[in-house]
Amino acid sequence: VQLQASGGGLVQPGGSLRLSCAASGIISSVNIMGWSRQAPGKQRDFVAFMSSGGSTNYANSVKGRFTISRDNAKNTVYLQMNNLKPEDTAVYYCNMGNNGVNYWGKGTQVTVSS
């Protein structure tokens, strides 16, 4: 399984970005896709996940601002990020739990700065 993330960039505080991550390879119909992030000098932290059945979970720090969604037909997960704050600056990684294995994609940089 390969994951390709896109959509990062530079945005001002209060702005929005939408990340996308497409998975390719042998993918079970039952899986979980999600996002984590890693700020400079910090550990990688969970952001959100969504199961193929539609269940979601969010980190407290992003609840009410970020929305995860997915297109199962395209094996693609999205992260809509609104009201971005400087503390959201990080490299964002998508991941997929598939057939008992957790896969990670290369990250995409999100920078929130005026």
Image (spheres, rainbow, N blue to C red):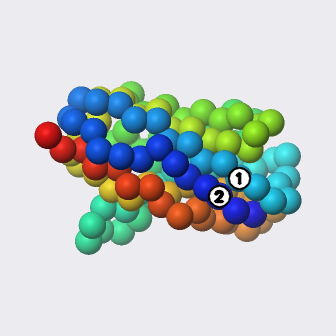
Q: Residue placed at 52% from the left, 48% from the top?
A: 6
Q: On residue 3, which mark appears?
A: 2
Labelled pair 1, 2 in contact (Cβ < 8 Å): yes
Q: Amino acid at mark 2?
A: Leu
| Residue 38 percent coordinates (x, y) | 37, 62
The residue wearing badge 1 is 23
Q: Counting residues from the N terminus, which is met first, the one under dot 1 or under dot 2?
A: 2
Front one among 58 and 90: 90
Q: Residue placed at 29% from the left, 44% from the top?
A: 10
Locate residue 15 relative to residue 95 in the image: left or right. Answer: left
**Vertical position of residue 50 compared to residue 3: above or below:** above
Residue 48 visible (yes or no): no
| Residue 68 percent coordinates (x, y) | 54, 35
Q: On residue 1, which mark appears?
A: none
**Vertical position of residue 55 compared to residue 33: above or below:** above
Farthest residue toward the left? Answer: 114
**Vertical position of residue 66 compared to residue 34: above or below:** above
Locate residue 44 relative to residue 85 in the image: left or right. Answer: right
Secondary element at tag 2? strand
Front one among 59 and 24: 24
Q: Residue placed at 35% from the left, 31% from the top?
A: 16
